[in-house]
Image (cartoon, helix red, strand yellow):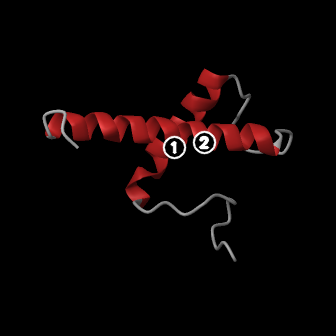
Amino acid sequence: MSNNNSSGTNRVSVPEARAALDQFKYEVANEIGVPLKQGYNGDLTSAQNGYVGGYMVKKMIEAQEKRMAGQNGGQM
């Protein structure tokens, strides 16, 4: 599968969210101790990169679950 994005990252479904997602990525990396920096990160292992992405997803799911619980009075 070809990726047309020259930065090598996945496409963002909501382009307006790109800056916020990038900031979130660096915050998560810092939180879990992965030395992610802007620019070239080829010195990181695939496990480190995967851990950042996986932890981002975990935190996004937790945030959405909290929103859903608040909107539905705790009922899902």
Q: Residue furthest front?
A: 75
How far apart marks 2 and 1 lie (CA) works out to: 5 Å
Measured as percent of width and height from the top left, residue 37 is found at: 70, 35
Residue drawn at (71%, 34%) of the image: 36
Q: Where is residue 66, by image quadrant? A: top left
Q: Quadrant of residue 48?
A: top right
- Counting from the top left corner in percent of width and height, residue 73 is at 13, 34
Q: Residue at x 63, y 30 (%)?
A: 29
Residue 6 lies, with reference to residue 36, above or below; the image says below
- Check disc 1 and report the residue beneath it: 57
Q: Is residue 39 visible?
A: yes
Answer whether labels 2 and 1 touch (C-beta < 8 Å).
Answer: yes
Residue beneath the point at 74% across and 28% down: 35
Q: Which residue is mark 2?
A: 54
Q: Which mark is residue 76?
A: none
Vertical placement of residue 73 versus 11, above or below: above
Circle 1 — which element? helix
Residue 40 appears at what percent x and percent y? Answer: 78, 45
- Amino acid type, mark 1: Val
